Amino acid sequence: MHNNLRRFAFDYASSEERQIDQGDDQSSIHFPTVFLFIGTKVSDAIAPIIQINERKWDNNAGVMYAHVVSRDWTAASADLKQGTSGIYSGSSVPSHSEDDRDEAGKAHEQNKMQTRVTRLELPVHTTGKSMSQRKDVYTQLHQDEGHLLELNRMLRQISYSIAEYGRLYASFDRIHVAVITRVDDPLNVFVPEISLLAKDIFNQSFKSVQMDLYALISEKEQMESFGYDSSLGVAFLRELDYMQSSQYSFHAPLHVTEDGISIPVVHSAAPLFDLAYLLSDKNERGISSTHDLEDNCEIICHMSLLKNRKLTDVSHEQQGERYNNTSFKNNIMTEDGRQGYVSAGFSRVKRPNESIALTVMYQLYRELVVRMSDIQMRSSIEKLEVLGLTPADVASVTAGIVPDDHAIQDMSGIMTHGISYSQLKHMTLREAEQALFGDGCEAYFRDNFIRAAELRMSQHSAAEQLHQHVQQTLSKHPDISLFQLYEWTNEANEAESIWRDFHGLIRDKSKVLESVRGELEQMYQESVDEQSFQRLPLMDKHNVRSFIRCFFDKVYRYKLEMLRLEMELAWYREYETALGQLHAACSRQVRVMKQVEHELHQAARSMIREADDYIGQNIIEYYQLVTAAVMQDIEAKRGEGSFFEDRFMGNFSQLAEAGAEALTDKLMAVCKQHILTAAPFHQTFEEELLRRANVTVDYSNREVLSKDELFKKLYRTLEEHAVIHIRLLDYTHEHRYEEKYFFGDRSSEFIRYALSTDETSRIYKLGCVHERRSSGVEKLNLMGGFHVEDMMYYRNGKVYYDSYAQNGYEFHGINPDLLPDIR
C-alpha cells in the first residue's frame, strides 16, 4: 500500500509536469547526444538520467545511452543472468529514489530502460582488491583485440541508431558526448581509449564531436575500504590532469575492423575533454544528503541542456544571459594555459505535487470519514428495520417456513378408532385424542409440520438473509454508514446498539411461547362436553365428526401457532449468531478504514518531510481547506451523499471488506478523476505557494506575505540549495569563476525579479534558460577554475595513494612517469 501511494504521487507529479495546457513546455536539444557510462559503480546514475531527460526533453527519444561494465556488474545484477561478453541491451540498476517503489514497479522501470541502454560487458573483474588491479584491467583490454572489436561494434551501433532519429534534431553537424564515470571505479583506467575511440567513430558521421567528462565522487561509500578506494580516486584524478593538459596526445590501434585489422586512433596535443566536471556527494560546506546522487544527475542533464539547447523563443533569448561555452572555458583557464575543472550545484522550487497528491488524498478520505461518522439519531425501530429484525420482518421469514393453517384441514383424514360420542363426552381433550387417534395426530403433525418447518429452516441462512437485507437497505439509504452498522451491532455498547432491543424481542417471544404452551396444556384438560360444536340427538357419528373438526381447529391450530413461535425464536437465535458475524465483519472493515487513514496520513507526512521546509510549509492545513471546498462544490452540483454513489466511492463496506489496497485504489481513482482536476490545483507555483503560505488569505491581500517577500524567500531558497557539489580547501580560491542560470519562464514575475536582484553588485554571470512553464523554477550554479590540489578529496586521498604505492601497489596502466607530479 505504501508503495502504491508513492507511485500514485509520482505519477500525478509526472502527469502534472507534462500538462501542456497547464503552461509547461519541454525543452529540445539541438544536436544529437550520447551518454557514455563507464564502470560498474556509475550504474545507479543511469536510470535517473534517463528519467530526467524523458521528463525535460521533448526529443529525448533520440538520445543514446551506452554502458561499459566489467563482468562483476553481471554477477551483481539481479536482472541479467548472461555470462558471456558482448553487446546487449540491459536495464540499469535503479536509483535510490526508486527505493520506495515495489518490486513490480522496479521491474517495470527496468524493463522500460532495457530498450534505452546499449551495454558492453568486458571480461574483467573490478571488485575486490589487488595490488595491480587497474594496471591489469588496462593490460587485458589492450592484449585482446576481440574486446576492442566488441567496443567498436557497440559504438558503431550507436552511431547508426542516431541516424534513425535525424528528424528529432535541428542539426546533425555536431554530436555531444557525455562520458560519466566514478573516480574510484577501476574500469575508468580505460576512459581515454573508450572516449577517443567513440570520438573517432562519431567523427565519421558528424563534422565535430564535443565531449565532456562527468566524474562522480562518492565519499559516503568509502567506509570499509577508504584507503584503497581513495587511492583509486587519486590515481584517476592524476590521469585526468594528464588527459586535460594542453600537451596530452594519444596514439593506439583501437580502431578494429571485422577482419581484425587495427587502425590507429590519434589525438594531437590538446585536452581530451572539452570540460571536465567533478561532482561529489558532499557539497562545498561538507554536507551530504540522501538526494545527492539525484542532484548530480540533474546537474549532468541540465548542463547538457545548457550546452546543447535548441533556441525556440528568440524574444526571450537575450544574448547577455545565454551560456557561452568558449567564454566559460577562457574564464576558468590560468594564465599559463592550465585548464580548470568545473563543479555545479542544483536546486528546484516547484509546486510539491507529490506531497499535494497524497495530502489531498488523505483529506478526501478524512472528509468522507467525517460524513460517515456524522451519525444521525435513529429510533430503535429504525435500527431494527435496517437490520431486518422487526417482528414483521421475522414473521415474514417464518411465514415461508411454517406451513399455513390450511394444512390443518388435511388432518381430518387421519383414521380414527371406533368410539361413540357418549364415550367421548366425559373425556378430556387429551384423553379423547388418545382414544380416537392414538399417537397418529402427534406423528402426523411431527412429520408434516414440525419436520417440514425444520427442513425449510435449515435451507435458510440467517447470515445471508441479514447481509442481503442490509445491502438492500444501504442501497436505498446511502446516509447509513459502515460506522453506524458497527455501532448498532456492537454488543459492548448497549446505549447505541440494537442488542438491548433485540434481546428484549427474544425475551418477549420466549414469554409468549411459554404462555401458549401453558394455554395448550390447560386446553387439553378441558372436557369434550365443554367444547362448542354442533350436536344432534341420536346422531352419534355426526357428533363425533363435529367434535373432531372442533378439536383440530382448536388444539392443532394452537399447536401450529406454537410451532410458528418456536421457529421465530429459533430464527432470532440464528440471527443472534449472524449479528455477531456482521459485527465481526464490520470490525474488520473499520480496522481496514483506520489502517488506510493511518497509512494515508503517514505517507502524506513522509512526502512533505522530503520537500524543502519552506516549500513544503502548510500543505496539510491549506489542502484541507481546498479539498473540503472542492468536495462541497461537487456535492452542490451532484447532490448530498454523491460521494457514496457508485460513480464515486460506492459502497465503503464492500471496499473495506475487499481490503486496504482495494479501498485505496478506489480512492486514488476518485481523487485523480474528480478532485485533483479541479481549478484550485491549476495555479502557478508562485500563486499556489503564496496562498499556502498565507493559508486562508486571498492572493491579492498583501498584509500577511506579499509577492516581494515571497520572491525574496524563493530566491534565497534556490541559492541556498544550489551549493556547489565539491569540497575545496579554500572557498575563494584564486581562479574561482561562477555562472548561475535559472530554468523557467523568462516572462514570469519571479524570474524577472530574480534577474534584476543585485544586478549592479553581483560578481557572477546570471542567465536564464527560457522554458514556458508555470509549475516551478530551477537553478544551476556553475563554478569552475579549481584544480585537483584544491580538492579536499584529493588532498586527503593522496596520503593513501602515496602509502599504497610505496607498499608495491600499481594504479596506472600507462607509465606513471607521463603523469603530472603529485601536487
Image: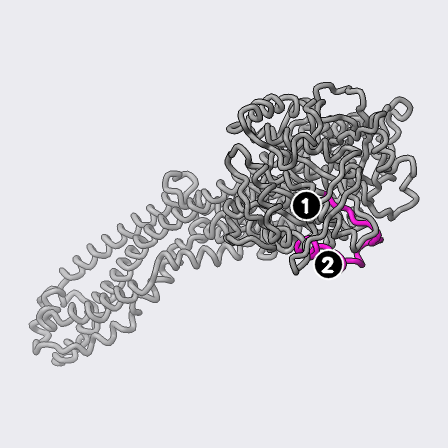
Q: Does the magenta stretch include residue 160?
A: yes
**Residue 654 placed where, x, y %?**
48, 53
Q: In which quarter of the image is the C terminus?
A: top right
Q: What amino acid is at disc 2?
A: Tyr
Check the image and report above or below for 614 versus 210.
Answer: above
Who's the residue at 39% across and 53% down the image? 389
Give the camera-side residue of 727 and 798. Answer: 798
Q: Does residue 738 appear to the left or right of 114 in the view shown?
A: right
- Asked which secondary structure carries label 2, the reply is helix
Give the camera-side residue of 100 and 165. Answer: 165
Q: Does residue 459 appear to the left or right of 284 in the view shown?
A: left
Instruction: Looking at the image, tell me whether mark 1 or mark 2 is earlier in sequence order.
Output: 2
Q: Label 1, label 2: how many angstroms apart (C-alpha)?
A: 18 Å
Mark 1–mark 2 contact, CB under 8 Å? no
Check the image and report above or below for 121 versus 797.
Answer: below
Q: Give the range drawn in magenta.
A: 153-178
Check the image and report above or below for 441 versus 109.
Answer: below
Who's the residue at 14% across and 78% down the image? 415
